[in-house]
């Protein structure tokens, strides 16, 4: 019985994918099941800016520090097989960073992108606390260029991972304005990642020597965390989210050390709101939102 | 009921706490933190070279001893500029033209790899007495058919990208010649990819033109297995040269020019004439020290097709070491070029292509 439920859940999830993708085009769409509830796609579009610290010993033994800018999108939806509990989520982000060495005699430029798709299970606890837990598959890639280096000018990042994902959230009010306080953490826990060998040039890789470039990762050699603490102000037709994102990425392979750390201020918009503010023309029980 | 709620809240708090703790988890692999002071910068430089330079064993260099000797030169009165020159002198002990320390006011450079040898070349002599100030030029290559139907091309730097179409024109224009002289004297190197473009015109099957290896760790003997560097013939439709070739070299042929000589020397129809090349058989990496100076150093050895290190240079073909003396060059005579012409002048012209 359990197996059957799981299988049908996965099938439903797969069948929901086209609708999911389609709904990205519009700010918010709903999928109504015959005689059932509607499950709008909640879209969060955000920009972020913050500090960035890079240590990439393939390029330099020094920390480079500077500013990172990013844009991100997150789309989530309650799943038809268990709308109150199962949520599917896709998110993507792109970041550009520019940093200087401590003596400010050389600059480094970074360009990275990150995409994740996952499912979470949510449950309500007393005091209106909601917790979610789930997993995701993701790809993360990009490059950091140290512009003055010759045959080792770039640290390429390429990473495919399986992540654990969790969040805790609780709504409260500021006057009459509903606000959702939320902390989300994503923790890639198993990965495959790229690294050249200690002193290997990209020229040698270009010649065809691909031996030893792919590494299996776990927390001991490829630790990464993405934590977003946010407050979402729900105005009804739209919502605004502000938050603080902490991201850390470490990679240790072939005695090469890579550490990327960022602290960012995030501000975003959620067309359609997150459902905390009750609308007079809607029967609340008919709509199942994905964030809370 | 209250107890259950408290438990749930405790669990939620624990979850958040674990999350926060993970965000603060330090990396397991710390890097040495060199201070931006005299000793910090010196030690950082010494260690970068110690861990990443690739020719300690070939050159029998005791880097620890060198480090101690030069570190002892630092005292309270040493300025940062003094330190730069102490560090420059230290890395010059590597006897490597690929090693440079760069600051805002100077780039150190080990010059003895060429200054201690005769030049064997004078561009003005070539242009005036052999090319008669009348040559064709494309992709940075000067070329002309010399008297006696001898094809000649001068390639001064591997930094000039050699275009395939340009090469087609050069070889087509020079086609009706007894042999081809490729002059790379004073060519200080550039992009290795140009070697493939050129070599592809002189081979009819894939060849292993050498090997490359890299460091796999910080130890002086931590190296990968040599990886073959293969060269493919130019694609069908491109003009090739299957006649005799004479490659002219001098001590100022360095880096990519040194590697090119090594590859060409292995071809059966090529004779290398002139002086031993200057070496530079290691692909350089870059790094830096806290004060902001950048350091470039040889990191990946390149080997000849026979698997020999070419860091110290490539000898001319046996019996073809020739020097162009300064007084002869001043008088308009280039002995190395004359030797090449002598090798080719009595050879037959290529047969005209079949009309079929």
Image (cartoon, rainbow, N blue to C red):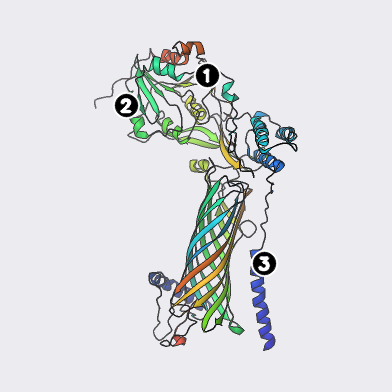
Query: Of label 1 and label 3, which has the lower sequence position?
Result: 3
How far from the left and from the top, in percent, is residue B216? 62, 43
Vertical order, A165 against B123 (above or below): below
Point out the image quarter for the C terminus of chain B.
top left
B78 with respect to A49 (left or right): right
In the image shown, does A265 or B15 lie closer to the viewer? A265
Element at badge 2? helix
How far from the left and from the top, in percent, is residue A48? 51, 63
Query: Of label 3 and label 2, which has the lower sequence position?
Result: 3
Element at badge 3? helix
Q: Are marks 3 and 2 on the same chain?
A: yes
B239 with respect to A42 (left or right): left
Vertical order, B181 against A286 (above or below): above
Which circle, 2 or 1, is nearer the viewer? 1
Q: Is residue B228 visible?
A: yes
Element at badge 1? loop
Look at the numbered discs 3 and 2 and tell me whether their residues touch, using CB distance below 8 Å: no
Residue at image position (63%, 56%) is A221
Location of mark 3 (residue): B21
Location of mark 1 (residue): B119
Residue at image position (24%, 25%) is B355
Look at the numbered discs 2 and 1 and tell me whether their residues touch, using CB distance below 8 Å: no
Location of mark 2 (residue): B172
Residue at image position (47%, 26%) is B264
How far from the left and from the top, in percent, is residue A69? 50, 59
Which circle, 1 or 3, is nearer the viewer? 1
Q: Is residue B325 visible?
A: no
Q: Across the whole image, how many numbered discs are drawn on residues?
A: 3
| Residue at mark 1 to residue at mark 3: CA–CA distance | 66 Å
């Amino acid at each position: 019985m359990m197996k059957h439920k799981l299988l049908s859940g996965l099938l439903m999830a797969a069948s929901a994918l086209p609708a999911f993708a389609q709904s990205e085009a519009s700010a918010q769409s709903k999928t109504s099941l015959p005689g059932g509830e509607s499950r709008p796609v909640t879209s969060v579009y955000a920009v972020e800016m913050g500090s960035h610290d890079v240590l990439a010993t393939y390029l330099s033994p020094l920390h480079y520090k500077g500013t990172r800018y990013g844009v991100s999108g997150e789309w989530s939806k309650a799943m038809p097989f268990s709308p109150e509990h199962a949520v599917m989520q896709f998110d993507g982000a792109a970041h550009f960073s520019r940093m200087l060495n401590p003596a400010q005699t050389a600059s480094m430029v970074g360009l990275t992108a990150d995409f994740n798709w996952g499912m979470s299970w949510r449950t309500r606890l007393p005091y209106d606390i909601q917790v979610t837990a789930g997993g995701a598959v993701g790809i993360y890639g990009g490059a950091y260029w140290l512009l003055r280096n010759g045959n080792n000018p770039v640290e390429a990042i390429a990473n495919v991972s399986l992540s654990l994902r969790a969040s805790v959230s609780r709504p409260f009010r500021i006057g009459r304005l509903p606000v959702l306080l939320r902390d989300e953490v994503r923790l890639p826990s198993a990965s495959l990642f790229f690294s050249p060998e200690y002193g290997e040039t990209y020229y040698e890789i270009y010649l065809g020597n691909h031996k030893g470039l792919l590494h299996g990762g776990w927390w001991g050699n490829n630790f990464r965390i993405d934590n977003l603490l946010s407050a979402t102000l729900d105005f009804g037709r739209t919502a605004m989210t502000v938050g603080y994102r902490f991201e850390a990425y470490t990679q240790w392979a072939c005695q090469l050390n890579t550490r990327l750390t960022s602290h960012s201020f995030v501000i975003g918009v959620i067309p359609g709101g997150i459902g905390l503010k009750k609308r007079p023309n809607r029967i609340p029980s008919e709509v199942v939102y994905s964030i809370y | 009921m209250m107890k259950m709620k408290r438990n749930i809240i405790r669990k939620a708090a624990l979850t958040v706490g674990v999350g926060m703790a993970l965000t603060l988890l330090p990396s397991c692999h710390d890097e040495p933190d060199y201070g931006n002071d005299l000793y910090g910068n010196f030690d950082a430089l010494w260690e970068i070279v110690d861990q990443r330079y690739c020719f300690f064993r070939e050159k029998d260099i005791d880097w620890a001893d060198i480090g101690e000797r030069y570190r002892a030169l630092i005292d309270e009165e040493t300025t940062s500029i003094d330190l730069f020159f102490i560090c420059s002198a230290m890395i010059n002990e590597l006897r490597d033209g690929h090693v440079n320390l760069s600051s805002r006011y100077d780039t150190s450079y080990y010059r003895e790899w060429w200054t201690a040898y005769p030049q064997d070349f004078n561009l003005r002599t070539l242009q005036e007495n052999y090319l008669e100030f009348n040559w064709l030029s494309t992709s940075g290559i000067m070329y002309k058919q010399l008297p006696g139907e001898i094809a000649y091309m001068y390639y001064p730097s591997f930094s000039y990208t050699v275009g395939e179409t340009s090469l087609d024109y050069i070889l087509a224009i020079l086609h009706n010649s007894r042999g081809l002289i490729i002059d790379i004297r004073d060519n200080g190197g550039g992009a290795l990819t140009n070697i493939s473009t050129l070599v592809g015109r002189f081979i009819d099957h894939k060849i292993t033109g050498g090997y490359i290896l890299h460091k796999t760790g910080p130890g002086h003997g931590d190296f990968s297995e040599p990886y073959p560097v293969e060269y493919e013939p130019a694609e069908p439709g491109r003009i090739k040269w299957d006649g005799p070739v004479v490659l002219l070299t001098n001590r100022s042929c360095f880096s990519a020019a040194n590697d090119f000589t090594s590859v060409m020397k292995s071809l059966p129809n090529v004779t290398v004439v002139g002086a031993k090349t200057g070496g530079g058989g290691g692909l350089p990496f870059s790094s830096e020290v806290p004060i902001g100076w950048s350091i470039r150093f040889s990191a990946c050895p390149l080997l000849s097709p026979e698997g020999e290190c070419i860091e110290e240079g490539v000898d001319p073909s046996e019996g073809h070491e020739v020097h162009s003396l300064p007084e002869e060059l001043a008088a308009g005579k280039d002995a190395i070029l004359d030797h090449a012409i002598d090798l080719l002048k009595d050879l037959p012209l290529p047969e005209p292509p079949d009309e079929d």
